[in-house]
Image (cartoon, grey):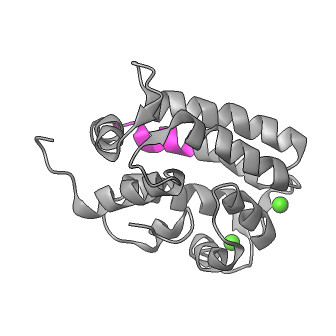
């Protein structure tokens, strides 16, 4: 890489990568990102939510990981190469994040009441193999007004901050414990 990216941002992308590289071979395959997450989602989410989630996550792979070449496996350097222009050169990226996170939120909000409870967020993170004991610190970070619920706005703000802000902020816990 010719231009060094901000260290902490790289750590966040690395942590996100580690979430999916469960066999520790340094490569995330499309099936690690889509199939394995959906397999787990079937245990925790309703059939309707799983369908919604599957479409979303497959699209996310194609857009952010696979890219125009339609890659089906990436190393961390390849992921950074693919994501960094979006984050640092695309002025609409925060807006894109917001749109994605709005759709994600609908998947996480299992009973569609417009708020995500600790148990709904736990089920969501379980799809990514995050242990239920590890969820509370993340939930507390997202719940910025401390009312015991995650609103759409709180979800979007923290999720966007995860990918777009380069500094070390509590938003690093968006996907569960920080792994990098
Ligand atoms: Ca809810
Ligand atoms: Ca809240």
Judge whether residue 98 is colored magenta.
Answer: yes
Q: Position of residue 105 (x, y in %)?
A: 70, 51
Residue found at x 34% / y 71%: 168
Up-down: is 59 above or below 41? above
**Quarter-of-image position of residue 85:** top left
Residue 107 shows in the view: no
Which residue is at the front of the view, 35 or 121?
A: 35
Up-down: is 108 above or below 119? above
How many marks the image carries: the answer is 0
Judge whether residue 93 is colored magenta.
Answer: yes
Q: Which quarter of the rendering shows the N terminus?
A: top left
Q: Position of residue 147 (x, y in %)?
A: 73, 79
> With 96 as the anchor, is 14 left or right in this view?
left
Q: Which quarter of the rendering shows the C terminus?
A: bottom left
Residue 91 shows in the view: yes
> Main structural element of the magenta stretch: helix, strand or loop?
helix
Residue found at x 41% / y 43%: 27
> With 100 as the anchor, is 81 left or right in this view?
left
> With 70 as the anchor, is 145 left or right in this view?
right
| Quadrant observed for ligand 2 in the rendered image | bottom right
**Quarter-of-image position of residue 88:** top left
Q: Position of residue 36 (x, y in %)?
A: 66, 44
Over which residues does the magenta segment extend? 91-99
Residue found at x 31% / y 38%: 78
Name, please, the residue furthest toward the left. 2
Which residue is at the front of the view, 30 or 67?
A: 30
Q: Position of residue 32 (x, y in %)?
A: 57, 43
Residue found at x 48% / y 28%: 72
């Amino acid at each position: 890489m010719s231009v060094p990216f901000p260290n902490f941002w790289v750590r966040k992308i690395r942590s996100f990568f580690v979430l999916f590289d469960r066999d520790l071979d340094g490569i995330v395959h499309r099936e690690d990102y889509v199939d394995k997450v959906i397999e787990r989602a079937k245990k925790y989410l309703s059939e309707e939510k799983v369908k919604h989630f599957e479409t979303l996550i497959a699209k996310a792979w194609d857009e952010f990981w696979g890219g125009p070449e339609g890659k089906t496996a990436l190393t961390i350097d390849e992921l950074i190469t693919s994501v960094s222009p979006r984050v640092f050169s695309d002025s609409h990226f925060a807006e894109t994040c917001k749109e994605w996170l709005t759709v994600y939120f609908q998947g996480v909000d299992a009973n569609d009441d417009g708020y995500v409870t600790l148990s709904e967020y736990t089920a969501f993170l379980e799809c990514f193999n995050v242990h239920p004991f590890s969820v509370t610190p993340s939930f507390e970070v997202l719940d910025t007004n401390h009312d015991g619920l995650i609103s759409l706005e709180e979800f979007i703000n923290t999720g966007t901050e995860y990918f777009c802000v380069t500094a070390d902020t509590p938003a690093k816990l968006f996907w569960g414990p920080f792994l990098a």
